[in-house]
Amino acid sequence: MKRPLAQVVSTGRAIPAHVMTNHDFAAIGLETSHDWIVERTGIVERHIARDGETTCSLGSEASRIAMQRAGVHAGDVDAILLSTATPDRLLPATAVDIQAELGATRAAAFDLSAACSGWLYGLTVAEGMIASGSAETILVIASEKMSSIVDWTDRATCVLFGDGAGATVLKRSRHHKGILSSFMRSDGTLAELLYRPHGGATVPITEAVLMDRSHFVKMAGREVFKHAVRSMAEACDRALDAARLTGKDIDLLIPHQANVRIIEATAKHAGISMDKVYVNVDRYGNTSSASIPISLDEAFETGRIGEGATVLMVAFGAGFTWASTIVRF
Ligand code: ACO
């Protein structure tokens, strides 16, 4: 096992106050039911951004909490990495808006686009920056306003997602605690199974695009499901092998929260019993890359992660991308 180079020293989260339950879809004329959604996904409700809540505002709020817990001041931050699929503007990066909000004027700030795996990708990038000596204190944030890119008339996707943000402070590791292993992989040949067809540089937003709603998320749900189960299993194996651990050594598994059936399949493959798996997809739905840092923050708050705990985190998302990281706290 390698010597850990970087450690997650604090966490924070920001969740919009407005709750939308499965029953609320009836009010927008969507043909679905609470029972269908719970049975297929495990989702009961999700939080939806309102009243000026943005990817920047949620990310900044989560960051302030994480910084305060770490005793980090705005001037101490060397880099801000924001994972998001829902930047507030296409140019510049939303990370610089968060930088401005926080007053972290010394920092380098940029967005990272790897869909639901983005926060884990960010951890690995930040670990490399710490290892190279280019940064000492890094904010790794995931902030997502999925409600802004789903088609609220498409019942196959809009019931799945929610909004929220999680933030973490990364520093050089001490006392052999920190990131023990990481794994990242992508397969761009499968991009069109989960994507936003139009609205980018190739086919910008036009009246025709707006009419056929092709700027919203499209997903081949069944295919995504199969790939998610397979890839998250592979990611668990790879991170465990690299750290020379097995599922028995893991105190808590935090999987990306997309669907409780994918979570159960991942835990089963890794040999981790469900009492050691963090699940909050019932309360938040799929908050894309924010789901793991939100869960991590809740797990600390509720005492699910104690001193010396070994935590396996694993994600899968559009791209496809998949990733895993094991951290000893
Ligand atoms: N309410 C009621 N019926 C619905 C709904 C809904 N919200 N959505 C779809 N249906 C219907 C379909 O129209 C279909 O009806 P039909 O048989 O008459 O054609 C039927 O339900 C079955 O549809 P499927 O898509 O085959 O249902 P499935 O069992 O595959 O469940 C689901 C769909 C929940 C989307 C599942 O495929 C899934 O979870 N896939 C993975 C999605 C995911 O996790 N994405 C995120 C990972 S990546 C990331 O996080 C960005």
Image (cartoon, helix red, strand yellow):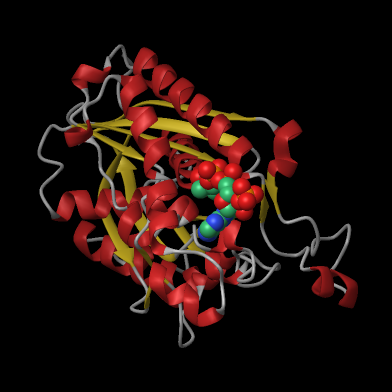
The residue depicted at 49 percent of the width and 72 percent of the height is 56
The residue depicted at 43 percent of the width and 41 percent of the height is 123
Q: Which residue is most to the bottom?
A: 51
- Residue 227, compared with residue 150, is above or below; it is above
The residue depicted at 51 percent of the width and 24 percent of the height is 230
**Front residue of 143 and 79:** 143
Q: How many marks?
A: 0
Write down the quadrant of residue 66 in the picture.
Answer: bottom left
The answer to whether residue 78 shows anywhere in this view is: no
Residue 21: x, y in percent? 37, 71
The answer to whether residue 92 shows anywhere in this view is: yes
Write down the quadrant of residue 297 in the picture.
Answer: bottom left
Residue 177: x, y in percent? 22, 31
- Residue 302, compared with residue 255, is above or below; it is below
Write down the quadrant of residue 23 in the picture.
Answer: bottom left
Q: Is residue 26 left or right of residue 61?
A: right
Residue 64: x, y in percent? 31, 69
Screen quadrant of the C terminus: top left
The residue depicted at 46 percent of the width and 83 percent of the height is 50
